[in-house]
Each structure stands twice: as structure tokens, then as C-alpha cells.
Amino acid sequence: MRAIWILMCAAVAWAGEAAPTPVQAPAQQPDPIQAVVAEGAFLYRQRDLDALLLVALRHARAREFAADGKATVLSGAETEQIRQALIAALPAREALAAALAALPERVTPAARDAIALDI
């Protein structure tokens, strides 16, 4: 009987102890590709800019656009300049799209594209 009493007291004492503190999960780091780089009617994220930058760099390196007809290698400063131009162009294209939407309905999509390229 005494053994049962000791076990019960030990169980009560054990249950009364402070529970071990749960391990806190490390704070989630924000995803860098989700960072907003430009804002207009839409939010433009780093992933959008990265994709457009790859396309722009491909165009910039194309032989037909190079002045000497040879493929070019862009410096880091030139790449950054392209990045900054794209950041400025993303929200600016919203106004251009709205302006082109105001064209008469009879203007074909190909003509709209040509007008946009001419602008």
C-alpha cells in the first residue's frame, strides 16, 4: 500500500512540474522572389523582373541587334541598367495598354501591336 502511495505522490509531483517548453519553429524567411519591385495597378515581383530580364538579355545579346553584327557580352553595370529600365517600364506599360484599349474596335490586334511597337 505504501508503494502505491509513493507512486501516486510521484505521479502528482511529476504532473505538477512545468511542462517542457515546446521548440519554436524558426521564423520563416520571406521568399526573395516574392519581393515587390514595382507597383502600379498590379504588383510586379522579383520573379517577374527576373523572367523579363532574361528575355531582355537574350535580345541584347542577339547578333541582329548588335551594332557590329557580333554577339555581345554585357557588363554587370549594363545588366543593372537593363534591370532598372524594366522596373520603370512595368508600371508604365499599364498606361500604354489602357491607351491602346481606347483605339477603335476595327483596329486589328496586329495593327495594335504595330502601334505599340512604333510608340
Image (cartoon, rainbow, N blue to C red):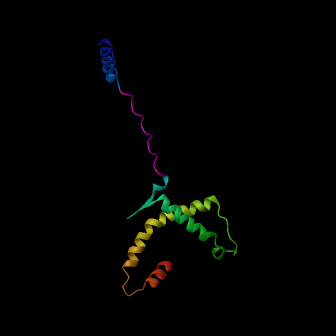
**Membership of 17 in magenta stretch:** no
Quarter occupied by residue 57:
bottom right
Relative height, residue 5 to residue 117 (above, below): above
- Which of the two residues, 54 or 41, is positioned nearer the viewer here? 54
Any part of residue 85 in sight:
no
- Taking the view exactly as shown, the residue that stands out farthest to the front is 1
Magenta highlight: main SS:
loop
Side (left or right) of 105 relative to 119:
left
Q: Residue at x 64, y 69 (%)?
A: 61
Q: Residue at x 39, y 63 (%)?
A: 42
Relative height, residue 1 to residue 92 (above, below): above
Horizontal and vertical percent position of residue 13: 32, 19
Q: Residue at x 46, y 84 (%)?
A: 110
Horizontal and vertical percent position of residue 84: 53, 61
Horizontal and vertical percent position of residue 109: 43, 83
Horizontal and vertical percent position of residue 47: 49, 60
Q: Which residues are magenta?
A: 19-31
- Which of the two residues, 10 or 77, is positioned nearer the viewer here? 10
- Which of the two residues, 95 or 62, is positioned nearer the viewer here? 62
Side (left or right) of 18 relative to 119:
left
Relative height, residue 98 to residue 103 (above, below): above
* Quarter the N terminus occupies: top left
**Membership of 29 in magenta stretch:** yes
- Tally of numbered tags: 0
Any part of residue 97 in sight:
yes
Q: Residue at x 59, y 71 (%)?
A: 59
Relative height, residue 48 to residue 27 (above, below): below
- Taking the view exactly as shown, the residue that stands out farthest to the bottom is 106
